[in-house]
Image (cartoon, rainbow, N blue to C red):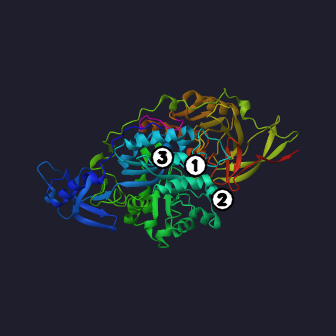
């Protein structure tokens, strides 16, 4: 694996003597902040009038009077009675879901106060394997904020139920554990594998624990019986797939951190934070995260600041909500000496705000430098020189035609009962539905809100198309939407009510190298180009967000009224979340982790 030299942020031992000298008054600080109401999440206090002295990008002194730290060249900033809070941490997220590279993702979220992220690049791992993870890891380390990488654990997410561009194994995990920016193992999505004692899954967990790092969890099942307990015994230390209060309680009782998320389409905070606000459980075992946020959300609504505000709106005390987005996250990943609180020795990541509930992000500091003010990113976010072949990952093998999307009916059938993937608004799980559909000229047709869905193989150019049905989007006639973002195997998902439009949409993405496109009545309504791995753009976040917003508007023109339905579209191939999904191998019943037939029964 190619290694790149990336200068690290100075470690505490390298600057400890200077920090001590500054705190003692023997050496001047680089920057002193005065006139602040300092929020100490470590004690859940707000201290009026404390002052903060910084040296080498770290806190040297935090206390009532920092005048002894001021020298002739020390910069002094008056906060004017506003609050000084720690920079926000996202405990679980996927940069690729923002449609942006790490550099552009950082540029988008820095003005929102996010200064630390724990990212799992398993999207690109499915396309380019360990090499793709390394590219994400390296660009992450180049940023002015802290982006730690979790080594993806599951590519494929469910062996035997999907085919990926590359696979990840224990030897890859062992290799990555020595990289400077690796913080642990990404979400262990193959929970049946862990429960059933898969030696590969347990070996990956073992390699992570041997390295003294954190194992991420993903238990996407409502079953909290022996299977859940077996999963916890397998080593995952957190979980973000809970959707109700009982899920959060069960995880915390078993020694896990319950990560509750607010992404672009996952609204799981309100239903779980009651474990703290009403049942009174210890809040230090709960962490806020986003999981998946697309660029439109990042640019127009926010990132972790949005999640904290939402938690407060759901009844959480502001200081408790801030703990869930700062010190709780830092402690979970073993970084409480580095981030997550305003205290000596830690990285000087902090936010200036005038209101702890509304949480306007007025000024942001990262590693002692002002990186944003008034919603504008002031920091340079360096780009990696992405290899040319990472921009050519869509291989269909042929030009697709309408006939490729036909679903043949059994001979002589006039109607057919079929299984249908049911989309659930603002939730990752789907429903396993059935519908009776008409047959015309030997081909099954959708009706009454039931559209077609196709999974088009795009890694090896096989020309393979798997067809099925989906409901819940509300699409009208003559439309199609295609995306090379198709969690987690990242083939191509095409949903439509017109097979000719489905073919044109798929071919369009092959032409531009990946992305998302929406078509209706023979015309392309929107296109978001994602040339890097078919997942990301290195264009500025605002530009990508504008195209993403146009995509959402185009979906509405086609009849869709769901909140952020693009996220639902992109997860229809995620074969580790119940109940019914599609893969390049067929229709998947995730409750049984088995392939299932599309046709239930014909009607003559």
Q: Quadrant of residue 347?
A: bottom left
Q: Residue at x 58, y 49 (%)?
A: 154
Q: Which residues are magenta?
A: 533-540
Disc 1 crowd rating (10 Å Cα; few below 14, some 14-19, many 20+) is many
16 and 242: which is toward the camera: 16
Task: Kindly identify which residue carries mark 2.
Answer: 196
Task: Kindly identify which residue carries mark 1.
Answer: 154
Task: Kindly identify which residue carries mark 3.
Answer: 176
Q: Residue at x 59, y 29 (%)?
A: 510
**Gap in Å between the C-alphas at discs 2 and 1?**
15 Å
Q: Position of residue 543 (x, y in %)?
A: 43, 35
Q: Which mark is residue 106?
A: none
441 displayed left or right of 35: right
Mark in front: 2 vs 1: 2
Task: Look at the image and say whether residue 397 sits in the magenta stretch.
Answer: no
Sequence-earlier tag: 3 or 1: 1
494 displayed left or right of 440: left
């Amino acid at each position: 694996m190619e290694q790149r030299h990336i200068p690290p942020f100075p470690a505490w031992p390298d600057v400890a003597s200077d920090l001590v000298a500054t705190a003692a008054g023997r050496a001047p600080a680089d920057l002193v902040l005065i006139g602040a109401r300092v929020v100490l999440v470590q004690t859940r206090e707000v201290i009026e009038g404390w002052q903060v002295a910084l040296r080498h990008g770290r806190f040297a002194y935090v206390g009532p009077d920092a005048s002894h730290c001021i020298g002739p060249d020390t910069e002094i900033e008056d906060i004017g009675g506003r609050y000084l809070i720690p920079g926000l941490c996202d405990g679980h997220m996927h940069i690729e879901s923002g449609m942006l590279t790490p550099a552009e993702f950082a540029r988008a979220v820095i003005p929102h106060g996010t200064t630390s992220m724990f990212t799992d690049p398993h999207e690109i791992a499915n396309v380019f394997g360990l090499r793709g993870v390394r590219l994400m890891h390296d660009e992450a380390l180049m940023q002015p904020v802290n982006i730690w990488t979790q080594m993806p654990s599951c590519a494929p997410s469910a062996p035997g139920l999907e085919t990926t561009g590359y696979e990840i194994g224990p030897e890859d995990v062992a290799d990555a554990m020595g990289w400077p920016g690796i913080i642990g193992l990404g979400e262990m999505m193959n929970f049946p594998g862990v429960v059933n004692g898969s030696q590969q899954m347990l070996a990956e967990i073992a390699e992570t624990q041997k390295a003294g790092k954190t194992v991420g969890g993903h238990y996407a099942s409502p079953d909290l019986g022996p299977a859940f307990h077996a999963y916890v015994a397998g080593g995952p230390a957190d979980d973000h797939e809970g959707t109700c209060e009982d899920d959060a309680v069960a995880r915390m009782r078993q020694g896990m951190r319950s990560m509750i998320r607010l992404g672009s389409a996952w609204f799981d905070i309100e239903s779980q934070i009651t474990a703290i606000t009403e049942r009174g459980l210890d809040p230090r075992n709960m962490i806020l995260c986003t999981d998946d946020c697309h660029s439109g959300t990042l640019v127009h609504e926010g990132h972790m600041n949005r999640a904290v505000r939402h938690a407060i709106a759901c009844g959480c005390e502001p200081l408790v909500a801030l703990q869930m987005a700062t010190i709780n996250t830092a402690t979970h990943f073993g970084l409480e000496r580095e981030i997550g609180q305003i205290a000596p020795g830690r990285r000087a990541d902090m936010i200036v705000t005038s209101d702890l509930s509304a949480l306007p992000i007025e000024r942001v500091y990262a590693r002692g430098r002002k990186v944003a003010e008034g919603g504008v990113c002031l920091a340079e976010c360096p780009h990696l020189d992405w290899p040319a072949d990472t921009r050519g990952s869509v291989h269909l093998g042929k030009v697709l035609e309408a006939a490729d999307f036909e679903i043949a009916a059994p001979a002589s059938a006039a109607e057919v009962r079929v299984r249908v993937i049911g989309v659930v608004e603002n939730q990752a799980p789907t429903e396993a539905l059935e519908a009776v559909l008409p047959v015309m000229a030997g081909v099954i047709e959708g009706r009454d809100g039931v559209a077609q869905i196709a999974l088009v193989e795009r890694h090896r150019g096989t020309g393979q198309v798997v067809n099925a049905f989906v409901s819940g989007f509300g699409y009208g006639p003559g439309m199609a939407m295609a995306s090379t973002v198709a969690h987690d195997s990242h083939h191509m998902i095409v949903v439509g009510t017109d097979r000719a439009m489905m073919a044109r949409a798929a071919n369009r993405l092959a032409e531009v190298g990946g992305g998302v496109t929406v078509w209706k009545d023979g015309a392309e309504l929107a296109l978001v180009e994602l040339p890097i791995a078919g997942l990301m753009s290195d264009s500025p976040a605002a530009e990508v967000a504008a195209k993403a917003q146009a995509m959402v508007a185009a979906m509405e023109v086609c009849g869709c009224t769901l909140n952020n339905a693009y996220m639902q579209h992109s997860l229809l191939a995620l074969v580790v979340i119940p109940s019914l999904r599609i893969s390049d191998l067929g229709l998947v019943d995730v409750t049984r982790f088995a392939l299932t037939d599309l046709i239930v029964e014909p009607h003559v």
